[in-house]
């Protein structure tokens, strides 16, 4: 498990360094403000090992990004509450299948 923790910490540091480094300013506390954005980016980026976003693996649906809301992406404009409920129920059934596929991808990746 220590390898997983080290890998995650390395990914967080990779995301934080370009956001907080400033030669003219001390950056000892700037990382706190940037941490949520870095975590969100890691959770909504498809994993090379599984092929799925961690967000999808937990919640069973794709994340809606703020830029999609700001610019009215087609999936936002076409949103219908009744269809969304039916789709969500179907997605919950398919989530187990997606997790099994992710396990196969992970095994092949390793």
Image (cartoon, rainbow, N blue to C red):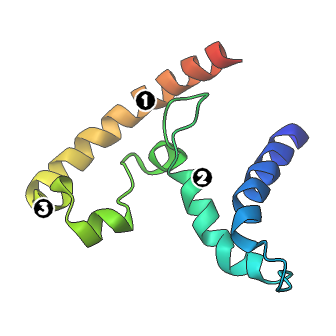
Placement of 19 over or under 95, stated as above or below: below
SS category of the residue bearing label 3: helix
Mark 2: few/some/many CA within 10 Å (<14, 14-19, 20+): some
Residue 95 placement: quadrant: top left
Placement of 23 over or under 101, stated as above or below: below
Q: CA distance from mark 3 to mark 1?
A: 26 Å
Residue 98 spot, x, y in % from top left:
43, 29
Placement of 50 over or under 28, stated as above or below: above
- Say left or right for 70 vs 60: left
Q: Which mark is residue 37?
A: none
Residue at the image position 49 percent from the left and 31 percent from the top: 99
Residue at the image position 59 percent from the left and 30 percent from the top: 48
Q: Which mark is residue 77?
A: 3
- Say left or right for 39 vs 93: right
Q: CA distance from mark 3 to mark 2?
A: 26 Å
SS category of the residue bearing label 1: helix
Q: How many marks?
A: 3
Marks 3 and 1 in Cβ contact (< 8 Å) = no
Residue 89 spot, x, y in % from top left:
25, 45
Residue that badge 1 annotates: 98
Residue that badge 2 annotates: 42
Mark 3: few/some/many CA within 10 Å (<14, 14-19, 20+): few
- Say left or right for 23 vs 33: right
Residue at the image position 56 percent from the left and 29 percent from the top: 50
Q: CA distance from mark 1 to mark 2?
A: 19 Å
């Amino acid at each position: 498990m220590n390898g997983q923790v080290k890998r995650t910490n390395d990914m967080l540091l990779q995301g934080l360094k370009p956001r907080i480094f400033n030669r003219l300013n001390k950056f000892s506390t700037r990382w706190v403000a940037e941490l949520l954005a870095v975590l969100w980016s890691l959770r909504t980026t498809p994993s090379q090992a599984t092929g799925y976003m961690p967000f999808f693996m937990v919640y069973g649906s794709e994340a809606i990004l703020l830029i999609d809301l700001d610019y009215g992406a087609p999936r936002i404009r076409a949103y219908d509450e009744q269809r969304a409920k039916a789709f969500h129920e179907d997605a919950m059934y398919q989530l187990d299948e997606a997790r099994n596929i992710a396990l196969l991808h992970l095994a092949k990746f390793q």
